[in-house]
Image: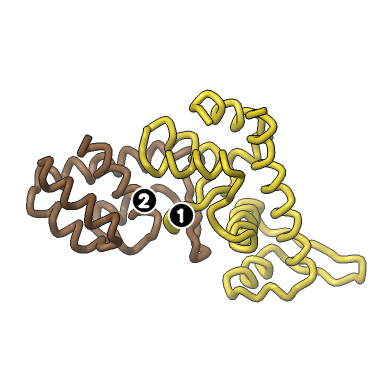
Chain colours: A brown, B yellow
Amino acid sequence: MADVLTKAEVLLKAGRVNDAINVLATDPATYNRVVQGVINALASVPGGRIADLNGNIWSTSQLIELVRQGRWTAAPPLINFLMAEVELLSR
Amino acid sequence: MSLELMRRWVASLPPSERNLPLLHVGGMFYTPLQALHEVERGTSIGEQLQKLVEEGRFGTDLVNLAKARLQVILKEAGPYKIASLSGREVTTTELEKMLQQDNLSDMILQRLLAAEIQVAEKSLNKAKEIKQ
């Protein structure tokens, strides 16, 4: 698990989101932990909505749905949540 | 700035201000409460947010910040009209549309954006006051 998370973290920091997700997907148990972690983090966001630099306002329930569908790149805020979760799990 | 100071800073802000976008990291705006949440979780994004607060920076330019704040305010305010002294009226829906189209020439919109910049600066300055 640690190896997959380290690789994913490096790729995410390099802005290679799809590659990072592909690496995570090679270890389904780790991927599921990341998904669950992101969903929990989103569910606990104060205010329940997030603004991005493109002028969108996302509700956390919308974002959770995108995570469940594996559409990580559909909303810029998801990258922040993915990065935070990978980082927390890799510690 | 320690976690305790972050907590004191957020607590010093008016409740409505705690839930408005203020800081920007990685394509996403964070409200003071969301920033505190990230700091409490101990993520590197939390560290970056804490650094922004310490340094009195927003992480993006003021116009982008004001636009994000106003978008949230307009969306949550529901429909109403704003009138200028010249007698012109503009609805919140029209203002939202202007923001989405990045058409910032309207005088009423410019005033609202300027007001948001002012409030945002005041909020961030509170962190400095608390640190001293």
| Residue B104 vertical position relative to residue A61 in the rendered view, above or below | below
Q: Position of residue B86 (x, y in %)?
A: 92, 71
Q: What is the distance, in whole Å, between disc 1 and disc 2 at their CAs?
A: 8 Å
- Give the chain letter at badge 1: B
Residue bearing mark 2: A80
**Dot 2: few (<14), some (14–19), or many (≥20) neighbours within 10 Å?**
some
- Tell me which residue sits at (73%, 66%) in the image: B109
Label 1 in the same subunit as label 2: no
| Residue type pointed to by label 1 | Met
- Tell me which residue sits at (57%, 49%) in the image: B21
A13 or A58: nearer the eye?
A13
Q: Quadrant of residue B55?
A: top right
Identify the mark at residue B28; answer none if there is no mark: 1
Q: Position of residue B131 (x, y in %)?
A: 63, 29
- Give the chain letter at badge 2: A
| Residue A56 vertical position relative to residue B130 in the rendered view, above or below | below
Total numbered labels placed on residues in the image:
2
Task: Give the structural element (helix, strand or loop) at label 2.
Answer: helix
Position of the N terminus of chain A by quadrant: top left
Q: Position of residue B123 (x, y in %)?
A: 67, 41
Q: Quadrant of residue A76?
A: bottom left
- Tell me which residue sits at (13%, 56%) in the image: A23
A62 or B71: nearer the eye?
B71
- Tell me which residue sits at (49%, 34%) in the image: B36
Q: Quadrant of residue A45?
A: top left
Task: Give the structural element (helix, strand or loop) at label 1.
Answer: strand
| Residue type pointed to by label 2 | Asn
Position of the C terminus of chain A by quadrant: top left
Q: Are marks 1 and 2 in contact (CB under 8 Å)?
A: yes
